[in-house]
Amino acid sequence: MTSNYVWVDAERSGLTRTDENGIEAFVPADPVNRDYAEFLSSGATAADYVAPPEPPEPTAAEKLAAAGLNVDELKALLAS
């Protein structure tokens, strides 16, 4: 069975293993973990961790909604 491995974080605390059927599993980087020991003994390599992109800055409308206010409530708040 062929599996692909990818580090889950920059600290290399675990791997994501994907088998040929596309099934993913988390493998902790712990030598006593059977799956990690198998990874080490197999000579397989893991792809480097790639951080996800930063989320875009929220729009003014999204910020307002996150504050739980609507436009009329904001206007009333600013007028007081």
Image (cartoon, rainbow, N blue to C red):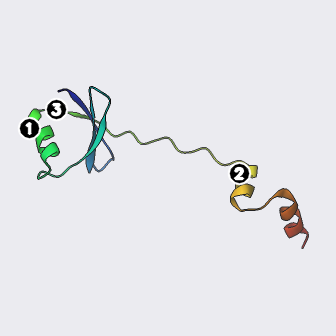
52 on left or right of 41: right
Q: Position of residue 41 (x, y in %)?
A: 8, 38
Label 3 residue SS: loop
Label 1 residue SS: helix
Structural distance between the alpha carbons of marks 1 and 3:
8 Å
- Which residue sits furthest bottom? 80
Q: Which residue is mark 1?
A: 41
Mark linked to residue 44: 3
Q: Quadrant of the N terminus?
A: top left
- Name the residue type under label 3: Ala
**Front position in the image: 68 or 52:** 68
**Which residue is depicted at the point 26% across and 26% down?**
20
- Name the residue type under label 1: Ser
**Which residue is depicted at the point 12% across and 46% down?**
34
Answer whether labels 2 and 1 touch (C-beta < 8 Å).
no
Q: Which residue is mark 2?
A: 62
Disc 3: CA contacts within 10 A as few (<14), some (14-19) or many (>=20): few
Among the two numbered marks 2 and 1 on one chain, the one whose residue lies closer to the N terminus: 1
Quarter residue 65 falls in = bottom right
Q: Quadrant of the C terminus?
A: bottom right
